[in-house]
Image (cartoon, rainbow, N blue to C red):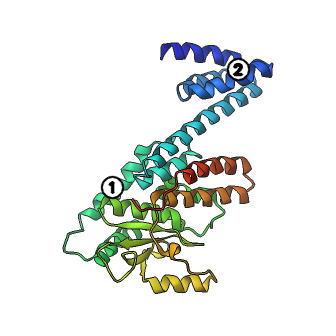
Amino acid sequence: MTNNMHEIQALVKLLDDPDHTVQLPVIDRLIELGQPAVRILEHTWESAPDQYFQSTIENVIMKIQQEGIKKELKDWADCRGDQLIFGAYLIARSQYPDLEFDEIERKVAALRNEIWLELNDQLTAMEKVRVINHFLFTVHKFNRSIRGVLSPQLFFVNHLLDTHKGLPVTLSVIYAEVASRLELPVYGVDLPHNFLLCYRDPAYLDDPDGIMFYINPFTQGSVMGRKEVEYYLSQQKIETRTEYLRPVSNITTISRLAEGLRFAYSASGMEEKAGFIEELLGILKHTRQDQIP
């Protein structure tokens, strides 16, 4: 580590070289060295002689942070996307690189513990969902945002936990994560123009996929049957396909979250940010699994 620090310090001194044949390999090496270079770069930024040098340092730091996010996302996806909320946290890091997972974990754990006290094995699946709905939507007032899908901010799980306002996919992420921690079989349903959840029990034989009912976090956790979801699709003039009604993996859920964020960035003219989310989507799609966890 000491040798790396000496190398980083030497490279940072060369970063101000106006000769691009010197500067470009220096930047590549700093990116390769990764997070240990960030602190030295930040310290150098404070005493940088001009704005151009500061801008160069900022770009290198951003690239290092982005490479770190890409690696963590690949590791998460390679593990079949265990812990849905961590995938959403990594997407949020694209905007908030210094965001700590402990901040997210603490708030989700508090929600889980509060709800757990009111659950017992005698409750039916529907009754358990009503308990979750009561705490999330009545006690803590999680609700739909009126700002719409063109606001990138609404795709960040930390923003949802701070404001309690979200979109179908972000509300679904929180709901599904809390349910998972309560050992309830609630999974995402990747519906066109919407995102729902389902309560799935393989022993439930009245549905070919074992889905007992669907949950819509965007409407305060309202419960629907398969026919109601099919009716929604017909109203939207969308052909009903079996895959639309089935539960999806955590990787697919986070892909949907990232796709929405990419669209919001593009619609807002933030093409550089949209491009990075496209890179994250490439990682997710490469490892995408449609099996539920």
**Position above or below: 224 against 202:** below
Badge 1 density bin: few <14, some 14–19, many ≥20, Cα 10 Å: few
- Left or right? Give the position of 205 relative to 20: left
Q: How many marks?
A: 2
Q: Quadrant of residue 237?
A: bottom right
**Position above or below: 282 against 48:** below
Name the foreground residue: 90 vs 134.
90
Residue 110: image tag: 1
**Residue in the picture at 62% in, 29% down:** 31
Q: What residue sits right under mark 2 in the picture?
A: 15
Name the foreground residue: 207 vs 176.
207
Q: Secondary structure at mark 1?
A: helix
Q: Earlier in the sequence, mark 1 or mark 2?
A: 2
Q: Secondary structure at mark 2?
A: loop
Residue 291: image tag: none
- Left or right? Give the position of 194 relative to 173: right
Instruction: Give coordinates of residue 10: x percent, y percent.
Output: 63, 13
Name the foreground residue: 170 vs 278.
278
Badge 2 density bin: few <14, some 14–19, many ≥20, Cα 10 Å: many
Q: Amino acid at mark 2?
A: Leu
- Left or right? Give the position of 12 relative to 71: right
Query: For the residues marked 1 and 2, what is the alpha-carbon distance in whole angstroms?
Result: 45 Å
**Residue in the picture at 53% in, 17% down:** 4
- Are the two marked residues, 1 and 2, in contact with CB atoms closer than 8 angstroms? no
Q: Amino acid at mark 1?
A: Ala
Name the foreground residue: 24 vs 283.
283
Instruction: Give coordinates of residue 86: x percent, y percent.
Output: 44, 50
Give the residue furthest to the right: 19
